[in-house]
Every structure is written in structure tokens, then in C-alpha cells.
Image (cartoon, rainbow, N blue to C red):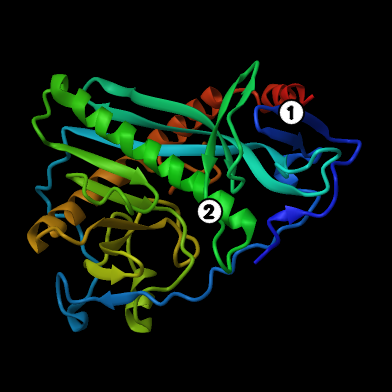
Amino acid sequence: MSAPHSPTAPSPGRSTAGAAGMRFTVDGWNPSYGTSLELEDADLGASTARIDVDVERPADDWAPLDPPADQARPGAVLFVDGVRRVEARVWIDDVSAAGPATEASAAICASYAGGVVCCCKEGAHLLAVDARRGLFTIAAHAVDVTTFAGTYTACHTAPSEGMPLSVTLSSALQQRLAGVELEVAVTARAQLAGHGVDGEDLLVIDGPLRGRQHLPRAIGFIKSHRAAYLPAELHAMVGALGPGQRTPVFLMGTSWDRHAWYLRLPCRPGAPWAGIVRVECSADLPAADVVALANLSPVTLCRYASDEYKDARAPQNLYPIAGLERELRRRLGDPRLLYRALRVAAA
């Protein structure tokens, strides 16, 4: 585990301040470069997922599947996404230091936001948004940091045995962001009453469904791939999918269980996995409901696939999600102003 404390006092290039029960410094390095004290990265390791490929059809009957010819689209599609940005890396002085600090705990000041875009007969419109700022730290005596550009609420987390401090803080930030995404998703669903869709909506979470799998009519949308979950012969079949085709449903389990399937979005021919996304839904749903969501996903998601000349992450970065990300990042504020505000607060 990386040491949670720096053995050195703040350098002349940093700003130091006192607060009620807390003194902190702002690291002079741009947060996009990490910190002046390098912290170890996490080792993702190999996948150990448990896989059951016989959910929809037996493994020896697997083949690319087209959606039913009469498959209807949902009355409204709710796209849920969140963004996060580290505004500054800070050092919180040891509470017992009477003079110049000799030890300090690394922390991060970050902005994060979640939002929902609704695509329905009224067009695409922002349905819910929630932006917040936080100070993420393992220092028990840390308090809120108030600046002229907003307040960073103290978010305490415990150090994890065998996990680098940088990963611990990043995980705490991601958990808070996931909580905000869940809140805006629930809020957005409540606002659909006036849309006249009568339960015919679909909730699309950008990223894994973990922590949100209890939401009704919800799927997770995973754009990138870090592991080969399927057996070799079925994994090879994913590359044979045509635009709008999907694999049969399979059940996968890691630290949590979910149903999943692969889908190819429309794109020009390229690498075998070009345009491939993984879609997830709850493991608790009956098989018929899972297959219904799987059949619904191609006619819904392919409609919003992006084009290369408009988006560098095409076709996986769906248009509503790309637009939502831009709006959320705008609402985070100017990073230069926020960094300056933190330096002023520390000084």
C-alpha cells in the first residue's frame, strides 16, 4: 500500500492555509499530470467472471440475432450519464503539527455531475441535472473547503489495505458520482408522468449497471472492453455480428451478477470488434423480460449511434450521451477559475 502521508513539508510553490481544525495546501502541479509525489496505479488483473451462456439458447445453437421485424421502439428513452473532474490535488496537514507541517495526507478536490436526457416525441431535452463539489480524503479531521467559486464538501473515506491511496480516493469519487446518477435517474422517471408514455420508457445507463440494477426497464451500456468474457469459440462469433445484430443473452458474475449481450452498432467495416458494445440488465429479471430488453436494445441504441465525422468515439458514443456530457462539463465550471479559487482559499 502506498504511504498515505508525505514526509515533506509544503514546498514554496504551494499555497497553505488554516481552517477550523484543518490546514491544507494545494499542489502546484496540474491535476491532469498526477501529483509531484507519484502514487501507484491499480492492477486490473485478469477476468475471473463466472459465465452461463445457456440463458437464451444453448451454446451449440449460438448465432447472430436480428431484432424481431415487428419490434416497437420505447415511447421515451432516458439516457443517464455523469462526468467527474479533479480540480486540484491537495495535502492536508497533520492535525498535531504546531509549526510548519512535516507530514500531510494526500487528497483531491473534485467536481462531479450527473444528468438525464429524455428522447421522446417532444424531441431531446434535459430532464434532470445535479452538479456537486467534494474534498475526498482519508484525513478524519478534514472539513469543508469554502472558496469564492463554491464549497467542496468533505467526503471522508477509509484507507484500503493493499490499495494505493490514489485508487482509494478515485473510487470514493466514483461512488459519489454513481450515487448522483442514481438520484437523477429516479428524479427523471418521476417527471415522465406528463410525457404520456405510460411505462413504455427505457433507461439507458452509460456504463455498467452496478448499483442501479434495481431500476425498472434499465440497461447498462458499456462502450469499451477490457476482458474476453465468453469462451473462445463464442468470443470469435462476436466479430461476425452485422450492424444491428446481437449475441444471445448470457449470465455473468464477478462481484455482482447481471445478464449481458454484445451488440454491433452501425459503422463502416473495420476491425472485427468495430462498433461492438456490451449491454447489461438485472440478473433478477425473468428470462422472458431479459430477452425482451435484448430485442429492444438494437432498435433503440442503433438509432442514436454517432458518425465518425462528428465524434471521434463513433459509433459507441451515442449522440444523446455526447450532448449530455458536454452540458455536464459546462456546468462543472471553468477549471482555471476553480483552481485559482482553491489557491486563494488556501492562502
Near-viewer residue (317 or 17):
17
63 vs 190: above or below: below
Query: Outermost residue toward the right?
Result: 12
39 left or right, relative to 200: right
Q: Say which quarter of the image contains residue 39.
A: bottom right
Near-viewer residue (152 or 32):
152
Q: 10 Å neighbourhood of mark 2: few (<14), some, or many (≥20)?
A: few
- Position in image of residue 44 (x %, y %): 54, 68
Q: Say which quarter of the image contains residue 317.
A: top left
Mark 1–mark 2 Cα distance, whole angstroms, equals 23 Å
Identify the disc placed on residue 18.
Answer: 1
- Let me know if residue 314 appears in the view: no
275 vs 113: above or below: below
Residue at 50% x, 37% y: name it: 83
- Look at label 1 and name its amino acid: Gly
Q: Are marks 1 and 2 in contact (CB under 8 Å)?
A: no
